Image: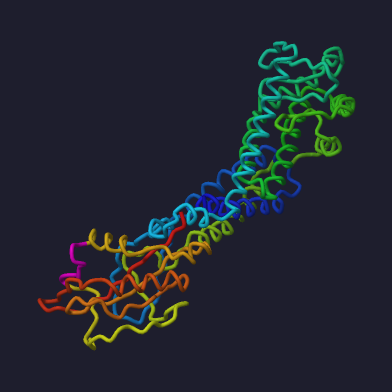
């Protein structure tokens, strides 16, 4: 659940950039179809970029050492580790889940139910009213005096409008919504609402898209009818205001804005608008780098700093003094007795998620560095990059308690070799 929340938060950043760019770059150029595409693509691209944000951008940490320190594969510790030993598994599991995890699920379900109810309401309206075939669309003749609206191929109109001289204009307007596939845009936005219900950009884009749909449909009708006659039809239908939000209504209380759009001389040069849109790219790239960059995380070979971050120095037990050069490139690397799989098994058996860190929802990757001495002893165990006191301490303890390794050799002689071990603590 936490992974999903992080994914939505990353996507929200990109969506905010797109909406801010749309608001600033739109200007007075009414490229309706291009703006419609921009809005729909903003959601798709935001979700796509957020999904790629798990890819780490490796930035090595500067070092004063002469080479590159060997790095072991990352070991992951889940929050469920060690629960059996606590004696109360159910209590620990419930205690580890934050209450606010349920809020997005609850809102998601409520919005999904509301969306399904609206669709079912449309279905009932189609079943309970006469339906007349009208070529590529179907007319649903409503007994109530409602504002005409459409959904997919169904056009909902009051029955008395069939005898009105505005009938042909109304039908052509609603058919334009069908031909331009505006209902699919509305459905797409309702699905996006399930994910971005909290985001002001969704409401901004929803209103903009609704206006663009009306502008496109108006332009379609004006290819055949006089602008004055069509505006008269809009005013005559303005008294009816009932419509369902998942539909394309003939009147959406924006008559004045639509009239202004009809009389506007449109500048259809897309070059300047496209150029302005490209100005968003640096902001998107910067957001992607900030969200995906993990400094020094998951390196195959990383240089490390001697500076310890956020961890108290812990005195080691008395040990013999080891001297001599520390190697980073040897003929035969040191090895945990039993190999890599045995090392992973040792870590799995001895590492547990600290209760306090789990309760406080603390997670992250701890980098531990240590030296395998010429006799295989693990020495000079330190934290290179810490997360919290609890996570750092358990990481130090498990590395210090390691049994002796098989030492490394250079030209037939045992040598000292330094390793980094990344340990990732994950709440699951």
Q: Most extreme residue toward the left, as rendered?
A: 412
* Foreground pick, 356 / 405: 356
Q: Most extreme residue toward the front, as rendered?
A: 87
User: Whole-percent x and y of residue 273?
Assistant: 66, 48
**97 relative to 411, above or below:** above
In the image, taking residue 47 as reference, residue 178 lies left or right, namely right
**1 relative to 165, above or below:** below
Image quadrant in which you'd find residue 251 = top right
**Residue 413 included in the magenta stretch of the image:** no
Q: Main secondary structure of the magenta part?
A: loop
* Foreground pick, 254 / 110: 110
Instruction: Name the residue located 78 percent from the left edge and 15 percent from the top edge.
Output: 141
**33 relative to 290, above or below:** above
Instruction: Name the residue located 71 percent from the left edge and 13 percent from the top edge.
Output: 134
The span picked out in magenta is 331-339
What sort of colour scheme is used for the picture? rainbow
Instruction: Name the residue located 45 percent from the left edge and 56 percent from the top edge.
Output: 88
**Residue 332 included in the magenta stretch of the image:** yes
Instruction: Name the residue located 71 percent from the left edge and 54 percent from the top edge.
Output: 24
**97 relative to 394, above or below:** above
Image quadrant in which you'd find residue 172 = top right
């Amino acid at each position: 659940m936490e992974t999903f929340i992080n994914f939505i938060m990353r996507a929200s950043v990109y969506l905010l950039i797109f909406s801010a760019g749309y608001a600033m770059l739109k200007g007075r150029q009414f490229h309706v179809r291009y703006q419609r595409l921009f809005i729909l693509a903003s959601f798709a691209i935001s979700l796509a970029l957020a999904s790629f944000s798990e890819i780490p951008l490796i930035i090595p940490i500067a070092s004063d050492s002469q080479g590159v320190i060997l790095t072991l594969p990352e070991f992951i510790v889940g929050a469920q580790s060690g629960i059996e030993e606590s004696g109360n598994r159910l209590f620990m599991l419930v205690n580890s889940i934050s209450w606010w995890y349920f809020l997005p699920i609850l809102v998601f379900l409520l919005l999904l139910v509301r969306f399904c109810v609206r669709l079912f309401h449309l279905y009932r309206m189609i079943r309970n009213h006469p339906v007349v075939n009208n070529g590529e669309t179907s007319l649903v003749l409503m007994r109530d005096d409602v504002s005409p609206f459409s959904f997919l191929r169904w056009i909902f109109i009051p029955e008395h409008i069939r005898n009105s001289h505005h009938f042909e204009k109304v039908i052509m307007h609603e058919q334009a919504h069908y031909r331009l596939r505006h209902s699919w845009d509305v459905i797409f936005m309702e699905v996006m609402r399930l994910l971005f219900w909290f985001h002001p950009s969704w409401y901004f884009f929803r209103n903009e898209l609704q206006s663009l749909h009306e502008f496109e449909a108006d332009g379609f009708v004006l290819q055949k009818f006089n602008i004055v006659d069509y505006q008269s039809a809009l005013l005559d239908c303005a008294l009816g205001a009932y419509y369902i939000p998942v539909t394309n209504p003939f009147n959406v209380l924006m008559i004045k804005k639509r009239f202004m759009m009809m009389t506007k001389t449109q500048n259809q040069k897309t070059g300047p608008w496209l150029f302005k849109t490209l100005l968003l790219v640096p902001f998107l790239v910067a957001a992607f780098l900030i969200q995906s960059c993990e400094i020094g995380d998951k390196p195959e070979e990383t240089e490390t700093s001697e500076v310890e971050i956020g961890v108290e120095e812990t005195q080691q037990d008395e040990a013999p003094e080891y001297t001599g050069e520390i190697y980073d490139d040897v003929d035969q690397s040191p090895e945990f007795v039993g190999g890599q799989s045995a090392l992973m098994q040792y870590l799995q058996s001895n590492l547990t998620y600290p209760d306090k860190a789990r309760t406080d929802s603390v997670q992250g990757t701890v980098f531990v560095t240590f030296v395998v001495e010429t006799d295989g002893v693990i020495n000079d165990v330190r934290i290179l990059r810490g997360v919290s006191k609890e996570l750092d301490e358990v990481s130090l303890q498990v590395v210090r308690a390691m049994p002796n390794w098989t030492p490394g050799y250079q030209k037939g002689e045992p040598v000292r070799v330094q390793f980094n071990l990344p340990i990732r603590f994950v709440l699951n």
